[in-house]
């Protein structure tokens, strides 16, 4: 049974401050109230939260989606070849990654975009050991172009990169306070889970991330925490060890 949605986040005695996190932001998170593109104010607010986390000594990697610009599936529905459409979607994530890099640097934090597709004139290639080195040096690493393969999503890229770089947790930013037993936007009686197993997410089809990304986390024991990006300060609270949102693990 899910825990009551009104339950206050409590300080967990078992969670510790994370040393290295990977934050997954959807492209839509950057849109704000708009229906396309990037809202500079929203971008700056998210960047400043990342800077705060990083300033407290936690290494931060970011995966950004591209849904605010292009989604391959949508373009394919409109008649475009799916692989070309996915290439456009991946390039859209690189644009968002560059915008985030710019916002972070504007706040005085070093950041590096690393792309899964080679675009050397605009950013670095993704090389795992180099990514880890950047993190160790206190740079925020932003992974662009998803996995570099069509038919995948940036959620799967987030699971993959979190596992590859040995993140302590994958933090998935959403518009609601965690995972619910039904859509909280449509159903006011929806109740939030405080914790779940990956198998429960898959069996109950709680589609917080696509099944591929959930399976990757499950099989590689990568804990996932789903939180509300619109609750200013929640990211910091999570890194400080507070039990915010919904945690998904192998139980
Ligand atoms: N994409 C892809 N391979 C990947 C990651 C992303 O082809 O490994 C493409 C796909 O077309 C997708 C688009 O990039 O629709 C944007 O990513 P996503 O939909 O995951 O972004 P989000 O929903 O998080 O904004």
Image (cartoon, rainbow, N blue to C red):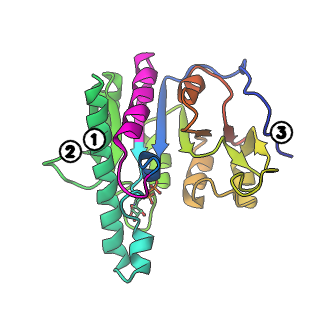
Where does residue 242 sit, x and y in percent of width and height? 65, 23
Mark 2 near mark 1, Cβ–Cβ under 8 Å?
Answer: yes
Quadrant, the C terminus: top right
The boundaries of the magenta stretch are 34-62
Label 1 vs label 3: CA separation? 40 Å
Quarter of the rendered image showing ligand 1: bottom left
SS at mark 1? strand
Q: Residue at x 36, y 67 (%)?
A: 86
Q: How far is the residue under mark 2 from the one under mark 3?
A: 45 Å
The residue that label 3 is drawn on is 4
Identify which residue is drawn at 74% across, 23% down: 10
* Callout 1 crowding tier (Cα within 10 Å): few <14, some 14–19, many ≥20: many
Q: Which one is closest to the eye, mark 1 or mark 3?
A: 3
Q: Tag 3, which secondary structure?
A: loop
Residue 69 screen position, x and y as percent: 36, 59
Looking at the rendered structure, the secondary structure element under dot 2 is loop
Indicate which disc residue 113 carries.
1
């Amino acid at each position: 049974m899910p825990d009551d949605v009104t339950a206050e986040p409590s300080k967990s005695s078992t969670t510790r401050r994370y040393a290295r996190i990977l934050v997954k932001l959807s492209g839509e998170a950057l849109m704000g109230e708009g229906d396309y593109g990037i809202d500079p104010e929203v971008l700056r607010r998210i960047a400043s939260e990342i800077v705060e986390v990083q300033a407290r000594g936690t290494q931060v990697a970011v995966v950004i989606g591209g849904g605010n610009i292009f989604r391959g599936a949508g373009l394919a529905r409109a008649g475009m070849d799916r692989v070309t459409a996915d290439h456009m979607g991946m390039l859209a994530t690189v644009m968002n990654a560059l915008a985030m890099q710019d916002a972070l640097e504007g706040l005085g934090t070093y950041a590096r975009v690393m792309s899964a597709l080679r675009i050397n004139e605009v950013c670095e290639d993704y090389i795992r050991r180099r990514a880890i080195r950047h993190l160790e040096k206190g740079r925020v690493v932003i992974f662009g172009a998803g996995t570099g393969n069509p038919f995948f999503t940036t959620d799967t890229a987030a699971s993959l990169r979190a596992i590859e770089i040995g993140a302590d947790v994958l933090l998935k930013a959403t518009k609601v306070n965690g995972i619910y037993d039904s859509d909280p936007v449509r159903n006011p009686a929806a109740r939030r889970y405080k914790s779940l197993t990956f198998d429960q997410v898959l069996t109950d089809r709680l589609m917080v991330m696509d099944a591929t990304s959930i399976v990757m986390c499950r099989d590689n024991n990568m804990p996932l925490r789903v939180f509300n990006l619109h609750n200013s300060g929640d990211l910091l609270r999570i890194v400080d060890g507070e039990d915010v949102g919904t945690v998904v693990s192998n139980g």
